[in-house]
Amino acid sequence: MTNFNECFKEGKAKKALVDKIRAKSLIKYSIIDIENALKISLNESTLRTIFRELYEGLREYIEAIGFLNGYKFLDHISITHFLKDVLNEEVISEKFDRYRKLRNGINYYGDPVSMETVKEIISSIQEIIKYLNRHLINI
């Protein structure tokens, strides 16, 4: 898939009714998940857990924005294209896609994640969320 329109053609994203209640719930719990991940002591044995939780919190937050715009995502790649093609957030799209690939490596291939990478996502996650707040329409 090279763009959001292809995500529709391939059935990886679809139109949905605008769902403010679901969006509010996703936002609430994504923030809780991110805050909880940030409370975990950062050491070599917690890196994978912290990274996964931060990624999942970010994904949920973006899915909430999708529901506010009338979209439902059936995979994580379509979220990347939504960020870039619908929200015009190319830099965030690139970061999300990088984090998606790292998370897939962790979850499906047993890849390690470095302390530097986890520190990077810790420092950028709150900035990304704050920046994406501008897309919370009529909530």
Image (spheres, grey):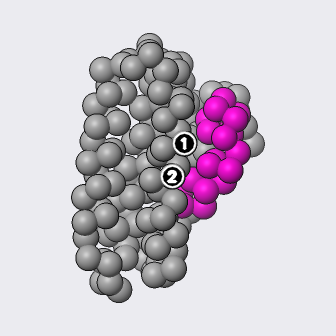
Task: Identify the element where label 2 is drawn.
Answer: helix
Give the residue furthest to the top: 17
Task: Name the image quarter holding the N terminus.
Answer: top right
19 to 4, vertically: above or below: above
Disc ID at residue 39: none
Q: Which residue matches tag 1?
A: 131
113 to 67, vertically: above or below: below
Q: Position of residue 128 (x, y in %)?
A: 52, 49
Residue 138 location, quadrant: top left
Disc ID at residue 127: 2
Using a 10 Å C-alpha cutoff, classify the residue at mark 1 as few (fewer than 14 neighbours), some (14 to 19) or many (20 or more). Answer: few
Task: Identify the element where label 1 is drawn.
Answer: helix
Q: Where is residue 13 in the image (x, y as percent from the top left)?
A: 55, 30
Of residues 80 and 28, the one nearer the viewer is 28
Q: Which residue is drawn at 61% across and 56% down?
A: 95
Task: Tell me: 132 left or right of 86.
Answer: left
Q: Position of residue 124 (x, y in %)?
A: 52, 60
Q: Name the amino acid, label 2.
A: Glu
Q: Name the amino acid, label 1.
A: Tyr
Using a 10 Å C-alpha cutoff, classify the residue at mark 2 as few (fewer than 14 neighbours), some (14 to 19) or many (20 or more). Answer: few
Q: Position of residue 50 (x, y in %)?
A: 34, 68
Task: Name the image quarter holding the C terminus.
Answer: top left
Number of dots carrying numbers: 2
Q: Residue at x 27, y 42 (%)?
A: 29
The residue stretch that appears in magenta: 81-100
